[in-house]
Image (cartoon, helix red, strand yellow):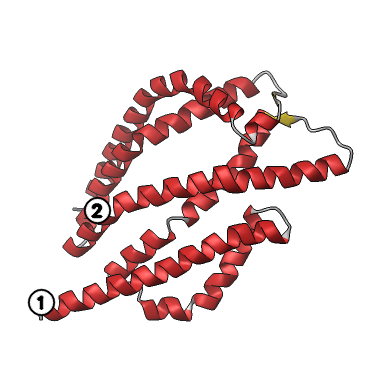
Amino acid sequence: MTLLSHLTELRRRIWRSLAVVLLSMGGGLYLAPKLLRYLKSVPPGSEMTWNVFSPWDGIRMYMSIALVIALTVSLPYILYQLWGFVKQGLHQQERTAALRYVPYSVICFLTGLAFGYFVVLPMSFSFTSKITKSMDLVETYGVAQYFGFMMNIVIPLAIAFELPVIVMFLTKIGILTPQVLHKMRRYAYLVLVIVASLISPPELISHLLVFVPLVVLYEISVLLSRVVYGRRKTTALVEA
């Protein structure tokens, strides 16, 4: 295909994805108040009163939550369109590996979301709340500010939980090896320390509660890389 043909194909798939997202917005608008009420009923949302500081805050949050729901519902179709576009530039082995690891990627992402929301977010909110009370300040939280705080914690952790799947895929297609991961360990740990310090409250116990799972994820990634690398070498010997 020529460059113009690729751009035409990409535009066609983008318009299809946007159409599905817009159709899903109807369901998102219906479910948005229910989701907001649920988040207010579970910690740390149940421990505060959410306020709006401008007439547009309520509408902005309503539309934002509806859009998140619509994107979540549309994600499988968007990934299908993305796959249809990129698979033409992949070898058969890469296509097979990508399709095989998609379900694991979704599971890891959801696990990271759950860990971030139910473990790290309450811990971070509790720490900031104690600091606020120790300074005799009144806790008055805007709903937009609270959701920004929540997303800054939950989304990076959900992405971090994708590490084992990414490593397995890159090992499968021959870009990574266990030896490279072993050599990168000290630098990887340094990066994980930085990530943990950015996500968690600035005190040692919170850092450890975030850093330890990230280290475990990295070591699991190294182990899985060895398994995939060994299978790849065995398959190559059999084919030879």
Residue under the image location 23 percent in, 73 percent down: 231
Query: Quarter-wise, where is residue 62 in the image?
Result: top right
Residue type at mark 2: give it.
Leu
Q: Secondary structure at mark 1?
A: helix
The residue lying toward the viewer, choosing from 36 and 47, is 47
Q: Secondary structure at mark 2?
A: helix
**First-in-chain label (1 vs 2):** 2
Residues at marks 1 and 2 touching, judged by CB atoms closer than 8 Å: no
Residue pointed to by mark 2: 99
Residue under the image location 52 percent in, 20 percent down: 33
Query: Quarter-wise, where is residue 75 in the image?
Result: top left
**Where's the C terminus, which quadrant?**
bottom left
List x then y, in percent, for residue 124.
67, 47
Describe residue 206's horizontal placement relative to residue 80 as left or right: right
Asked whether residue 158 appears in the rendered view, the answer is: yes
Residue type at mark 1: give it.
Glu
List x then y, in percent, for residue 20.
32, 29
Residue pointed to by mark 1: 239
Residue under the image location 50 percent in, 44 percent down: 114
For marks 1 and 2, give the CA distance: 22 Å
**Neighbour tally class for label 2: few under 14, some 14-19, many 20 plus, Cα within 10 Å:** few
Query: Quarter-wise, where is residue 24 in the image?
Result: top left
List x then y, in percent, for residue 74.
35, 34
Residue under the image location 18 percent in, 53 percent down: 1
Asked whether residue 197 appears in the rendered view, the answer is: no
List x then y, in percent, for residue 190.
59, 71
